[in-house]
Image: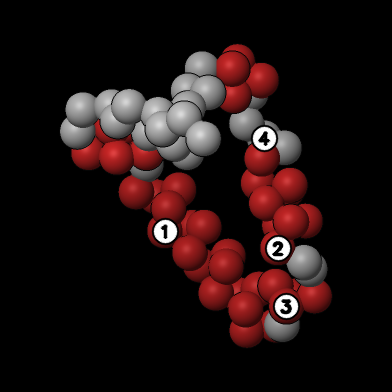
Amino acid sequence: MTKIIESEKDADAGREASGEMDDKPIWEVIDEIMRDVPEEALRRLPADGAEQHDHYLYGSPKSIPQES
């Protein structure tokens, strides 16, 4: 896994140096990255991931949703 990360850093550094990264809006960059994520992996993501991020990142208890 380290080799992949290092090669991605090298590739990003090359794109930054050439100015290639500045030409695309961020949503296009994200779209290119997400294109390779299998549909099965996306289905396994929690539906409440944004609301309960502390639980998923740090293992804290889930918070009780507040009603409006």
In-image side of 33 versus 7 (left or right): right
- The kind of residue on which mark 1 rests is Glu
- Which percent across, then down, holds residue 60? 19, 33
Tell me if label 1 and label 4 are in contact, CB under 8 Å: no
Q: What element does badge 3 sit on?
A: helix
The residue nearer to you, when weighing 63 against 25, is 63
Q: Is residue 4 visible?
A: yes
30 versus 1 height, above or below: below
Q: Amino acid at mark 3?
A: Asp
Residue beneath the point at 72% across and 82% down: 19
SS for dot 1: helix
Mark 2 element type = helix
Mark 3 Cα-neighbour bin, 10 Å: few <14, some 14–19, many ≥20: few
| Identity, as a three-letter code, of the amino acid under mark 2 | Ile
Mark in front: 1 vs 4 = 4
Separation of disc 4 and disc 3 at Cα?
22 Å
The disc label shown at residue 22, or none: 3
User: What's the residue type where badge 4 is placed?
Assistant: Asp
* Residue on which the image places disc 1: 6
Q: Residue at x 62, y 78 (%)?
A: 16
Q: Label 2, on which residue?
A: 26
Q: How many marks?
A: 4
Question: Is 1 left or right of 55, judged from the image as shown?
Answer: right
SS under mark 4: loop
Q: Residues within 10 Å of mark 4 (few under 14, many from 20)?
A: few
> Where is 43 relative to 17, above or below?
above
Residue 26 location, quadrant: bottom right
